[in-house]
Amino acid sequence: MSFAPRSDFPLLAAQPSLFYLDSAATSQKPRVVLDAIRNYYETANANPHRGAYRLSGAATEEYHGARREIARFLGAADADTLIFTRGTTESMNLLATAWGKQHVHRGDRVVVTRLEHHANFVPWQQLARDVGAEFRICELTPDGHVDMDQLRLLVTANTKVVAFGHVSNALGTINDVREIVHIAHAIGAVAFCDGAQGAPHLRVGFDALDVDAYAFSGHKMLGPMGIGGVIAKRALLEATHPYQFGGDMIEFVFDGDTTWNALPHKFEAGTPNVEGAVGLAAAVRYLDGLGMDAVRAHEVALTGYALEQLAAIDGLQVYGPAGAESRSGVVSFTLGDIHPHDLSTMLDVDGVCVRAGHHCAQPLMRALHVAATVRASFYVYNTTTDVDALVASLQKAKARFYAHA
Amino acid sequence: MSAELDELYQSIILDHNRRPRNYRVMDDAHVHADGQNPLCGDQLTIWLKFDGEQISDVSFQGHGCAISKASASLMTATIKGKTRDEAERLFSKFHGVVTGVHPEDAESMGSLKALSGVSRFPLRVKCASLAWHAMHAALAQYATAGEAAPVAPVSTE
């Protein structure tokens, strides 16, 4: 079931006995991404937007060319509504701080879901506390989906924003973005989507989703760390005050006041992360080469295989949706009463890299009544060999742990 | 590496994890302190009772990985009857061994030697140390406030 060749990924190629199953935390990088970053510094590096010399023009073109490619990949026709940030965390903070402080007031309601990563939970919780708004959490159905009936009740006339994840990082649940957007829009609220776990695995199609903003992280989709962004509707961005102040984002600075530059610059203060943008553009070209429909098909097949193999281990409990079709390539589980950190240490000795812990989703873990789970997550370079190594190592760990019981 | 796992998860550790000693709430304790590791959700409480300088009784409760639970259990079994100074010195020695700074001290730690395998797994030192940090906080509180006042939770993050 080889899909993206392991030889395309220098770290994986150099460590043939490593079974990397933590792509929901960060993905490995293909050589084309590393080459693109190096090539940028070797041929086009200068501060974009600043210089009247040709090299600065080349850097500017590299940067905005990357923006156009990434916007196209995510299905946004208006590339200037893609704001580069450090990643989803900064994107959600931008929305909660810049848009939120301006549009959410005392007595308003802010709605999130029980599935949220802390990065799409805490900014809204703190915004609500700061302005005196009501912060409400939509609970889940027993199989780990957002309870849409409850959401319809929670989204009342005073609701200003519904913030939700496209895909749960802890359970892999794929949310019905269109339906959540529809519920928010029906009463005039905006809908913001945390796409950190969506953009790497699913065709996004931003314009067709009708969502007001969609945030993503480059490093989870084969790109470098430190780059990501948010795409938002032009009218929303134009009606929102800047998030940070500095170079690039200004138009005219007078002694007593300042006017703002056009989009996207208005939200990109300071020297931009050009190498990150260029690296991420190379990553989306690589993903386009694979085809996002094929990426999804590969993950469904691999996740289905993993769910089947894991079900055969006595005492192993999987959390989240039952079938591979309704989850992305994420499988969260516990094994008997073995603590996930003990399991992770034992798996690590066999070269199996998994995440153990609360997955930055403590409110969700409390609702599931577990302190922590083990999470295996798959991406384009994973194969059934990785799943087989995981299962074999789990069997060994179980034998070791219960040897003297 | 498998030999290192054998050492880390040796039978005494797995036994103390499964059947922790002194695992109870102590209603008449002089001090208690919470230890928590937010990263992995481990949480435990240590209770201490004194007879003058001597720790006359010690207990714990909580949840966590096998390493943190076994370490707490072994700690309670070891420090009961020791003076406060002796307990603190044992913590220093224990810390030196699990961090791999003073491996030579392992032999003089009695049953705590079972935890010396942690030194090969730097990511697990916090697990092994959690109960000890809580005990240290409880002792410090006792030293300053005597038999009064609860102790603020200590965190290994």
Image (cartoon, coloured by chain):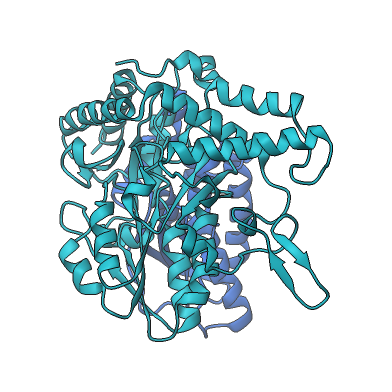
Chain colours: A cyan, B blue
- The percent position of residue A128, horizontal first and vertical second, equals 44, 77
Which image quarter holds the N terminus of chain A? top left
Res. A157 visible in picture: yes
- The percent position of residue A297, horizontal first and vertical second, equals 26, 27
Task: Name the residue at 61% across, 58% down.
Answer: A267
Task: Name the residue at 33% across, 28% down.
Answer: A295
**Residue sitting nearer the eye, A67 or B142:** A67
Vertical relation: A297 (above or below) A188: above
**Residue sitting nearer the eye, A347 or B149:** A347
- The percent position of residue A126, horizontal first and vertical second, equals 48, 73
- On screen, residue A219 versus residue A44, left or right, reads left
Task: Name the residue at 24% across, 73% down.
Answer: A154
Res. B100 visible in picture: no
Vertical relation: A15 (above or below) A121: above
Vertical relation: A117 (above or below) A167: below
- The percent position of residue B59, horizontal first and vertical second, equals 39, 65
Name which quarter of the figure residue A54 lies in: top right
Which image quarter holds the C terminus of chain A? top left
**Residue sitting nearer the eye, B121 or A254:** A254
- On screen, residue A317 versus residue A400, left or right, reads left
- On screen, residue A357 versus residue A55, left or right, reads left
Task: Name the residue at 18% across, 68% down.
Answer: A150
